[in-house]
Amino acid sequence: MPASATPENFFSSRLVAKGSPLLIAGPCSAETEEQVLATAHGLKALGRVDLFRAGIWKPRTKPGGFEGMGSVALPWLQRVKVETGIPTTVEVATPRHVEEALAHGIDVLWIGARTTVNPFAIQELADALAGTGVPVMVKNPVNPDVALWAGALERLERAGITDLAAIHRGFSTFAPSRYRNAPTWILPIELKSRFPQLPLICDPSHIGGRRDLLLPIAQKALDLDYDGLMIETHPDPDKALSDAAQQVTPARLGEIISELHFRYRSS
Ligand code: PEP
Ligand code: MN
């Protein structure tokens, strides 16, 4: 059983303290120090963001595009934490990423959809994460395969990493869909049946792929009692170097949050 409500457990203890779903926000990619800090201060002003996300090593489908700023962006995230008090999270795909992120005080790590599909990569990450005590979020694999998602979580658990959460970012389908990645809501429910205590976070940005779908997808997740939302935010979304169509300004995120109906949580 991965998560229990102990103070050492980042996700469960914050959920208990907050009493409402966690909000994770920040740009798809860290592009410049100014962009990262402008996003972070805009999010700080909302007063309810629990974790600041930014991709610095970007797993792009095709070569030749923007592949992230890499380690040069890690000090920018340290500034985010100092100036806003919001803890930070980055995507890691290799043991070197883990080592560099932790050396720069990143609080939480996440494993992306293109890494969860590869048991060799997950095992290497599990070995690198063992003994660090860092909280880890695991996105579903790109393909609709719950066993692979569960297997990644099990590899981490077996390495002693117990402060875990799962992120539902939708599934790739061959059939045309209004979604960038089909939500197929039954699959995360199936994962929950295998890990009843595991916090489940929804990523409406990568499911929808479009700004106008963020609100209905986030609402559906809340109606299904998800424990958190991860939503990409950028000070000038149309100019974003990755995932421009799905990012919103911090101010727009504030409007979306105020339009959402949160269920009463008794525990
Ligand atoms: C991201 O969060 O920016 C990302 C690359 O997501 P995913 O792994 O879900 O495609
Ligand atoms: Mn993205």
Image (cartoon, rainbow, N blue to C red):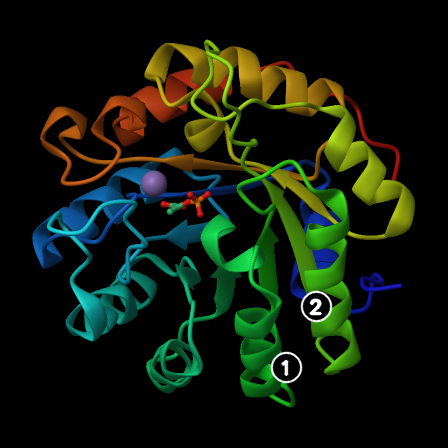
Element assignment for label 1: loop
Label 2, on which residue?
163
Q: Out of 5 and 192, give the one closest to the viewer.
A: 192
Q: Quadrant of residue 182?
A: top right
Can residue 262 be seen from the camera position used here?
A: no
**Mark 1 burial class by Cα count in 10 Å: few <14, some 14-19, many 20+:** some
Q: Is residue 225 left or right of residue 47?
A: right
Q: Is residue 71 left or right of residue 217?
A: left
Q: Are marks 1 and 2 in contact (CB under 8 Å)?
A: yes
User: x%, y% of residue 46?
Assistant: 38, 34
Label 1, on which residue?
133
Q: Out of 110 and 256, give the one closest to the viewer.
A: 110
Residue placed at 25% from the left, 71% from the top? Answer: 74
Q: Is residue 250 left or right of residue 169?
A: left
**Mark 2 burial class by Cα count in 10 Å: few <14, some 14-19, many 20+:** many
User: x%, y% of residue 160?
Assistant: 75, 82
Q: Quadrant of ligand 2?
A: top left
Looking at this view, name the residue that lies furthest to the front.
174
User: x%, y% of residue 25?
Assistant: 40, 42
Element assignment for label 2: loop
Q: Is residue 43 left or right of residue 3?
A: left
Mark 1–mark 2 distance (CA, rounded to whole Å)? 7 Å
Residue placed at 73% from the left, 59% from the top? Answer: 13
Answer yes or no: disc 2 within 8 Å of ligand 1.
Answer: no
Residue 204, compared with residue 17, is above or below; it is: above
Q: Quadrant of residue 162?
A: bottom right
> Which quadrant would the C terminus be assigned to in this image?
top right
Residue type at the position of mark 1: Gly
Q: Out of 120 and 169, give the one closest to the viewer.
A: 120
Residue placed at 55% from the left, 17% from the top? Answer: 217
Name which of mark 1 and mark 2 comes first in the sequence.
1
